[in-house]
Amino acid sequence: MLILSILFLNRTLRLIIILLKLTMANTSKIDNNLFKVPLSTGFRRFFYFVKPEESSFDSPENVPSYINEALPFFFVLIITENIINWYKDKKMMRLNDAMSSISAGIISQLPLLFGRSIEVVVFCYVHKHYKIAELNWNSPITWWIGFLGVDLGYYCLHRAGHEINLFWAAHQVHHSSQDYNLSTALRQSIFQRYCSWMFYAPLALFLPPQVYMVHVQFNLLYQYWIHTELIDTLGPLEWIMNTPSHHRVHHGRNPYCIDKNYAGTLIIWDRLFGTFQAEEREVSYGLVHPLQTWNPFNVQLCHFKWIWLRFNQEKTILDKLSTIFKGPGWHKGTPRLGKHEELPEVEYPVKLYDNHLPYWYNIYVFAHFLILIVAYTELVQFKTVN
């Protein structure tokens, strides 16, 4: 077994060397600097610390891919979080769960390697053909309207993602981890963008597409750093901003956490619309009925399969449609979102889905996973320069 493991490791190292050589061979076409922007710029973007004048553009084509530029920062922050957890003797990231989350994130971005996001395509089309006003793209007022409009649009999208079963089939991917750390933030659905466009399209009636493209990226980047247990509460900011404490509640499967705190950047929407819940006691993370798999494709598709099964089991057209468009907890004889009292209580200590491989297998899998990450970042960079 040890000899086989060494052979696997040797093959892995050879693949890494080959990939590095190919990368270095492309220096004429691809900038191989790990960080595409200054460190201070990259980190402050996560906190929306940007000025209108540095993030306003005259056309959609000139809007940077802030998400792609943030890729190395994602992993630097994940490593930093784990070093701090190790130093403080707190719960460390589980390798299998983290790889499942990052794999889901890579899968979610694959369609963007072949074309523009459907959200951007629809937004540009609506703005070109149906706009009722044209705001000045270079105005700070337009920038702040975009900030508020995109954040409200995200609240509506996120709430629908929990209250409409078809949309939940996509969004549940993000909630499927039983851990809560920065790698969890990368666990995204490949399907969610195909229903999110409709919640932003009304903004296209007056908001320039380039302003939307800026804020939809910053809104997503802001939500990255709040996926951590290292930060407790943030004082007065808890009243206005979405924080790690608020978002921990959102990821909880405890009955008091279900369907709460849908905010992207501002928690004021939850306070206004009655969906706010403060963190009161220990939160157990994940789905109400936790998944028992690391398979990234099963994670992406499992709830669609469950809806199809339920759809075929229902006898009437109304019940079949209710299975699709009512909440995930709905069944015949219950309210639209199901009965809250039917939610199972969390049993402590919580049993996490886990499995254990031999030490050398973990090295082998991790090394190949690093190859996958490097290959993906190279593909992203290659597409950007082309």
Image (spheres, rainbow, N blue to C red):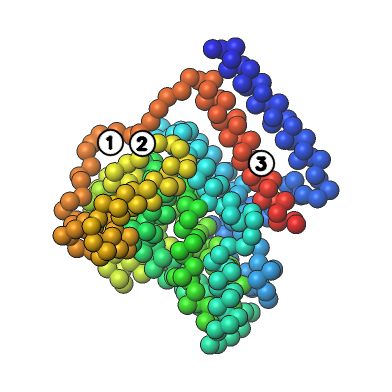
Q: Please give the residue where the numbered disc 3 appears in the rendered image.
A: 375
Spot occupied by residue 183 in the image (x, y as percentages of width and height): 48, 44
Q: Position of residue 8 (x, y in %)?
A: 61, 21
Residue type at mark 3 is Ala
Q: Nearer the viewer, residue 249 or 61?
A: 61
Res 207 seen here:
no
**Is any atom of residue 169 visible in this view?**
yes
- Snapshot quadrant of residue 354: top left
Residue drawn at point x = 21 percent, y = 50 percent = 343
Q: Badge 1: few (under 14), some or many (20 or more) residues near its Cα, within 10 Å?
A: few
Mark earlier in primary sequence (3, 2): 2
Q: Earlier in the sequence, mark 2 or mark 1?
A: 2
Residue on which disc 1 sits: 350
Q: Are marks 2 and 1 in contact (CB under 8 Å)?
A: no
Disc 2 element: loop
Look at 46% across and 70% down and name the residue there.
Answer: 198
Q: Quadrant of the C terminus?
A: bottom right
Mark 3 and mark 2: Cα distance apart in space: 28 Å
Asked whether, in this view, residue 296 is left or right of residue 331, the answer is: right
- Tag 1 or tag 3, which sits nearer the N-term? 1
243 relative position to 271: left or right: right
SS at badge 3: helix
Q: Would you say the residues marked 3 and 2 are in contact, meaning their CB atoms lie under 8 Å apart?
A: no
Q: Which residue is mark 2?
A: 292
Q: Foreground mark, 3 or 2?
A: 2
Task: Please state which amino acid type lies under the numbered disc 2.
Answer: Gln
Check contact, mark 3 vs mark 1: CB within 8 A.
no
The type of residue carrying mark 1 is Val
Q: Is residue 313 above or below residue 207?
A: above
